[in-house]
Image: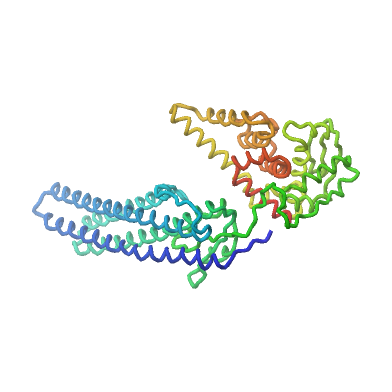
Amino acid sequence: MATQTNPYWKDRIANNTWKAYNKTEIRNQKLVEMYKTAREEIYNELIKFDAATNTSRTAAYNYQRQLALQKQMNDVIIQLGYDIETDFSEQMANVMAMQYKNISAELAGENFTMLKENVFKDVLKEPWKGNNFSGRLWINQDKLSQALDKVILNGISAGKTITEMAVKLDGMMSNGLYNSYRLVRSETMHYLNQAALMAYKDRGVKRVEYLAALDERTCETCGPLNGKTYAISRAPILPIHPNCRCTYIPVIDVANEATTKPAKSGTIKPKINVSSLSGQLPDDFIDDVKNILENAPDVCQKVWNKYQDKIKINNYESKRGAFYSPGWNHIEFSITKDRNNSAGNMTTIFHELGHLFDANGGAETYNSGLFTKASKRFENGQLDVLLKKEADNLIKKTHSELKKIDKATPKNQAYKAIESEIRALSNPQKSDISDIFEGITKGKINGGWGHGKAYWKNHDPSSEAFAEMYSSSVNNPESLEQIKKYFPESYDLFLEILKEIAK
């Protein structure tokens, strides 16, 4: 489905982001003053050291003076770090709040709830690309302190004059200023973009467009990304590199195709073509399939219409269970069992059709065979990655909560807690998520429904998740609700895969 963005958002949101960045950068000139003060303090300590150290003193005395100098310089760098961290954190929490407020007002007028100040302060503590601002700052300060120590040690051992050492120290401080300035610039752009994404999510935006600052400074990395759109939950973390000025603007005219509600009056829905089923299934079953599809999400209907001529039903009263065979490109299942399915009437047929669409969509989209499934090829297997990430996050969170009660709680208790939560659901609610969790954890979580632990030795969770998400989107709203609860990012990606193979 084509996506478009209104130039209005480029003019308003992106330009306001860059203005906020530039204003913050002006205030960051305070860094220069902080480093100037620190330079003067270090120089004064060096003068004191020179005055107190001479050849008439014992070597032990002079060594103690050297250690004192190094400690004084280290204290100056530590205080400098505290000053930078305090100033930046206070400033950035306010800038993030203003960014969130301005974007929310652009998207929702006055009809929004402002987040509390602590929310933005907490975001500043969250690591991105391996660390947060505080962590990176203190790594820089530690390197600077070590570099200054080295200047003193080498200078004394080589018999350098105080002036020579002062010049060398000044150069090191200049490097420290550059590193701090670059860090603050990068962190500022990161948190402006985080505040923007927070506002977009809270206002219901589903996709965002990557917007590079196109001028003579645009780099080879960011330029090609300009205009690319992403599901908001999977937008790359910005900045891409130090001094990067790229940002995101909302894609606000893309309808949410996950809805299972009937189309609004006046909306043209695709006409469902079930002609390929004629002669393969009983007429009353075909009628039911058509009725269900007529109330399915648009994207599910489009996939059906594109690949329905590929549907082959080898046996609809199979005694071997239900399955899709990519080798024969056909489906076997039991109508009798599916009519009485405790997970939901006719959920099996749409599950197996999900496998068929996954295989045929992958074959056509990627010009390969039926064993090349779209769920595995799309964005280099990102569906597997997201499913595992979301499951792992829940397991870690559950384990952490259990350890608050008993620090000695082993991880397997987290598996059992999640398993119990799933088992407490009704069959229609738990049938799909139980199988997904079983696949991701290799049987460590068994919610009462699934293919069995041995099945996952030769099968990928993403393939089954794709089929389960298709079936639930079309014909099992209770299951869909649980899938969106436990695997929201994975489901958003599933919809993107459908859009890709429906083209």
Determine the residue positioned at 11% across, 54% down.
Answer: 52
Q: Residue furthest bottom?
A: 216
Determine the residue positioned at 60% across, 34% down.
Answer: 441
**Relative to 273, is 85 on the left or the right?**
left
Residue 501 % position (x, y): 72, 53
Determine the residue positioned at 39% across, 53% down.
Answer: 93
| Picture layout, residue 282 above or below residue 105 | above
Q: Which quarter of the image is occupied by the C terminus?
A: bottom right
In this view of the protein, can residue 503 be seen by the observer? no
- Residue 289 versus residue 465: which sits nearer the camera? 289
How many circles with numbers are drawn on the protein?
Answer: 0
Residue 329 % position (x, y): 82, 44
**Relative to 412, is 74 on the left or the right?**
left
- Residue 45 versus residue 231: which sits nearer the camera? 231
Q: Residue furthest left?
A: 56
Q: Residue furthest right?
A: 279
| Picture layout, residue 166 above or below residue 274 | below
Q: Which quarter of the image is occupied by the N terminus?
A: bottom right
- Residue 59 versus residue 65: which sits nearer the camera? 65
